[in-house]
Amino acid sequence: MSKVIVVTSGKGGVGKTTTSASFSTGLAMRGHKTVVIDFDVGLRNLDLIMGCERRVVYDFVNVINGEATLKQALIRDKAYDNLYILPASQTRDKDAFSKEGVGKVIDELKESFDFIVCDSPAGIERGALMALYFADEALVVTNPEVSSVRDSDRILGILSAKSKRAEDGLDPIKEHLVVTRYSPSRVESGEMLSIDDIQELLGIKLLGIIPESPAVLQASNSGVPVVRDDDSNSGQAYQDLVARFLGEERPMRFMGPEKKGFLQRLFGT
Amino acid sequence: MSILDYLTRNRNKKSASMAKERLQIILAHEHTNDDAPDYLPALKQELLAVVSKYANIDLGDIKVNLDREGGFDILELNITLPENEKKAKAAARR
């Protein structure tokens, strides 16, 4: 049985595309046939983060309109041959997304993929609603910051009211909390919301914590999802997250500040 | 954490807990309005227009609440009228 997973947040700039890229790559690294779809019509970026921007020929809207076949539009990842990217259209307007059109493409993908990851645009407009409509599970990406937490709360409301599962009266979408840009030292000094605070406010189960790290920018600079960076703490955090999603038990890392030496503690870094 | 951080720590300590408190309040508030119909704000505006023909009130004087009790929706309106203006003036003169 294939699964549709939406990566969503409401607020922009919190790490949806970074998470979509690393989550889908992580699933492929573990041997699962995975496709990741960019739903951000007009603001295509997943291709850049995945490092395949120069190989885009056809896009999602072309497929919906019957101008290209799914096979023509899917881009195979260079490093993992069980990973595919379906890029967003850069030129068309969002009205191209009809429920029927998107549903047909997702049904076709379900025939050959284990996991279908939908990278949602920010906001609660058509693109975002379409990205979550067909979802079985959701990764709710949240920063430890007031506006992000509030927007995540709104998105949780929409997930439980406006999805296909809600409309058909099926089991609700399974929601997972992903906290990104987390800075344990700032939490310890009381200037950042803690994991416990965010979990208490949103009331959903924590899937992973991604610490604030320079590796994320370096990864996007080079077009290699950060999950492939074994040496960075955020890469390891995404690997843990994927393992947990697949049902493995992994203790939460990167919750506390890094250990510092005596002199460092005295004088800061 | 350096000595400097340690000295400024108490001031910073407040901001995360302030964030949490503010979020608890606003999320609770937004959840109570979850299934309120979309027309409530417009209803308020129109009520204001009607009542202000006769009395001097503003939007803050109108409270519209939607409650649910045993399958019934109860729309509660609470409009605070200003004190009688003549009386108020007389009181001020005295």
Image (cartoon, rainbow, N blue to C red):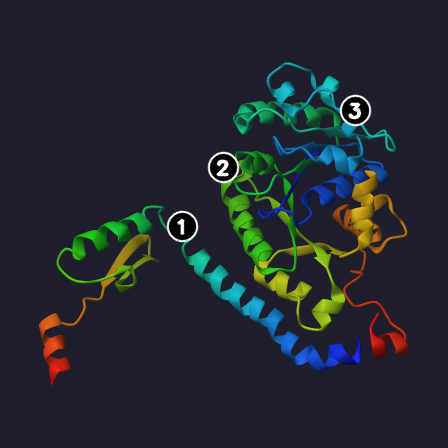
Q: Are marks 3 and 2 in contact (CB under 8 Å)?
A: no
User: Relative to A217, is A186 above or below?
Assistant: below
Both labels 1 and 3 in a single chain? no
Amino acid type, residue under disc 2 in the picture? Glu
Q: Position of residue A235 (x, y in %)?
A: 83, 50
Amino acid type, residue under disc 1 in the picture? Asp
Q: Nearer the viewer, residue B30 or A206?
A: B30
Q: Quadrant of the C terminus of chain B?
A: bottom left
Identify the residue at horizontal 30%, vertical 53% (top origin): B72
The reply, left or right, for residue B47 in relation to residue A230 is left
Which quadrant holds residue A219? top right
Residue A167 is labelled as 2
Q: Position of residue A164 (x, y in %)?
A: 54, 35
Residue A55 is labelled as 3
- Give the SS element for disc 2: helix
Q: Position of residue A10 (x, y in %)?
A: 57, 47
Q: Alpha-carbon distance for marks 1 and 2?
A: 16 Å
- Give the SS element for disc 1: loop
Residue at the far front in the pictured view: B93
Residue A224 seen in the current view: no
Residue B35 is labelled as 1
Both labels 1 and 2 in a single chain? no
User: Relative to B14, is A115 above or below?
Assistant: above
Chain under label 1?
B
Q: N-terminal of the two: label 3 or label 2?
A: 3
Which quadrant holds residue A268? bottom right
